[in-house]
Amino acid sequence: MNQPKRYLITSALPYANGLKHIGHLAGAYIPADIYARYLRQQKRDVVFVCGSDEHGTAIPIQAMKEGTTAQAIIDKYHPIIEQNFKDLGIEFDIYHRTSSPLHHETAQEFFTALNNKGDLEIKETEQFYDEATSTFLADRFIKGTCPNCGYDNAYGDQCEKCGKSLSPEELINPVSTLSGNAPIKKATKHWYLPLNRHEDFLLEWVLKEHKDDWRANVVGQVKSWIDGGLQPRAVTRDLDWGVSLPNEAGKVLYVWFDAPIGYISATKQWALNNGKDWKPYWYNEDTKLVHFIGKDNIVFHAIIFPVMLKLHGNILPSNVPSNEFMNLEGDKMSTSRGWSIEMDDYINDWIKPENGGGQMADALRYYLTAIAPETKDSEFTWKGFHTSYKSELSDILGNFVNRTFVLMHKLCNGKVPVFHNDIIDDDDKQLINDIKTAKQKVEDNLEEYKFRDGLFEVIDLARKGNQYLQKKEPWKRKAIDGKYSTEDQQHIDNCIHLCLQLTANLSILINPFLPFTAKKMLYMMKVVERMLDWENAGSVTLLKVGYSLRAPELLFRKIEDAEIEIQIEKLKAKSLKTKENKVEETTQHTEHQIPVIKPEIVFDDFAKIDLRVGTILSAEKVEKADKLLKLEVDLGFEKRTIVSGIAMHFKSEEIIGKQVTVVCNLAPRKMRGIESNGMILMAEDKAGKLHFVNPDHKIDEGSGVS
């Protein structure tokens, strides 16, 4: 296969709705940066683009939480996220914004091109609508009770308690988060991308052409979606925040459609900034396009965006390296639950000159790469971080470089000694071979996106250097009157010479992974960055004989156990505080919320509801649903099974025999696999406690309530 003429590398655009955690860093940004740095060292034509995703409902929702505007939110978080990446050594060629006029123009042109060619479909559907605010509701602007676990604050797209993906139609008693009213259904027109038309293309392109060179999780997920049958996907939505639809008031492009186009607009902006032509990077087949993502973005980058690119006449991605998820201390990372390590927090705690600066940025890069979730979920632990830092970075790489420089100054007057070919031995030959072969091993792994394995090969080369030093033991040669015999000096020279050449090679090979460390090594060797050119790796003549080198400096400082304990306690405290804040918010909401009266109805509407008195005959907890009770209720004329979300308020044995008011003509609904035939009326006090709405004395079951 011919080498591509140019490379376009993308990392998934992070939402500018808050700080990003180290799980994001491990998934889409460090691997992409490693690959881009490696390609730059090979002097290839590389453009590495990313930027803030500033549209979608996540932004206005965060604005509501912070009591500000959507524009203020993106203006707040965009520069923070961009600086976080810089502090951690992520070197984009451009970090753009989807709020930029250039992006809006690019996304609108993309939509118009597809629409004009008939590649989109227009459909009229009914969607939830808030009459009080005259707003069509995105899924995240609808809340209700989860049908899966009974949680009463589930969103229209997902329950944050049990994690189940939902649709607004599945919620029990859905309400608008904007007004508190129950939404109605209202007709609206939207444009759709008919993915079902492109199943054959995807089958051929992904499942045949790339089944062997793409990661299994990507191919597997594409196959699963196709096996389930692809459906048309809405390209537009009714919102006032996003890329506006040309000539259609009140409609914007769906964020999933406009965000990946951000890669194109970012490339355009980079080209404008550098006097380049952007088109070859998106239209020429000799460009290699690589998307780095987390597994939650597979469907967008391996199914939807490729279909969009194909229809638009652009090149398709050559690969979509997708990582699995990284957990934290035995649990899933979650910013909303306070169980995460934000990049900003790590930077503030560790990356200060007095705390190690760049070396601690590399410490995080190292550990996240060493445990990268390339084939399965992995786990970050602070103790694992500490162990990896000490036993690998410090004790292997740092120790080898430090010993080499100390011995050079002690035994060779601080200069690169001559190499005596006439006394070369098997250990020397083996180390020379290890240096030469390491380059190809690292290269092979990076070309195949195996970054963990590539990093292992670099550390393994440093490990071999330590083993070589231990065998040679140059410090044991005996000096007489401060001088060594000619033979001893020659053996010392050869050992130190090869260790210095190995150090130079390590700086080249480690640079994609640990750029701050590589620069510090260059400083100690007194060489320019040209040394890092990939073509130099494998050579044992990089440092000239007689060249004076600087005094040794520790590459990695010692991390005390107490520093790690502080981080563990900080994580626990943060999680606890988040839980307490949520409880406080809920309490305040309950105590101070002004009741919202639902839309006015006429008597005929109320008359449709059949309310009757029933007696609870039995009650039992629903398995794996903390809030649900399965009730058998006697209505006089029949007995019914009703599933009710009251388990947190009543014990099963306490309510047997209780008389309750039942909505009898409510359509049956399945909850946790149980068909519920009715609803128990309840009242909620200011403290959030539920109470039965029941007669003040026992009456016959089945009696009507009016």
Image: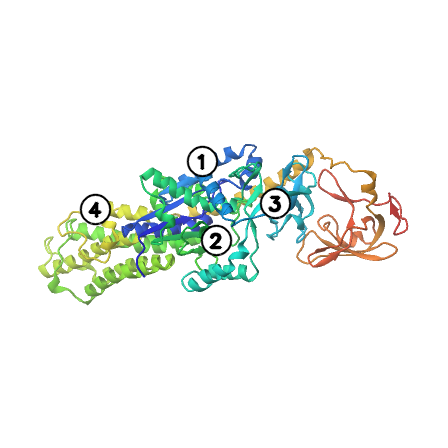
**Frontmost residue, 63 versus 161:** 63
Name the N-terminal-most of marks 3 and 4: 3
| Tag 1: amino acid | Pro
Viewer can see residue 48: yes
Marker disc for residue 527:
4
* SS category of the residue bearing label 3: helix
Of badges 1 and 4, nearer the viewer stands 1
Count of numbered labels shown in the rendering: 4
- Between tags 3 and 1, which lies in front? 1
Residue located beneath label 2 in the image: 307
Residue in the image at 50% along x and 33% along y = 71
Q: Nearer the viewer, mark 4 or mark 2?
A: 2
Position of 358 with respect to 65 (left or right) is left
Q: Residue furthest right?
A: 700
Are circles 1 and 4 on residues that touch, CB within 8 Å? no
Residue 101: mark? 1
Seen at 47% across and 34% down, the residue is 75
Q: Residues within 10 Å of mark 2 (few under 14, many from 20)?
A: many
Q: Which mark is residue 139?
A: 3
The secondary element bearing badge 1 is classed as helix
Secondary element at tag 2:
helix
Q: Pick whichever, 482 or 602, lies toward us.
A: 602
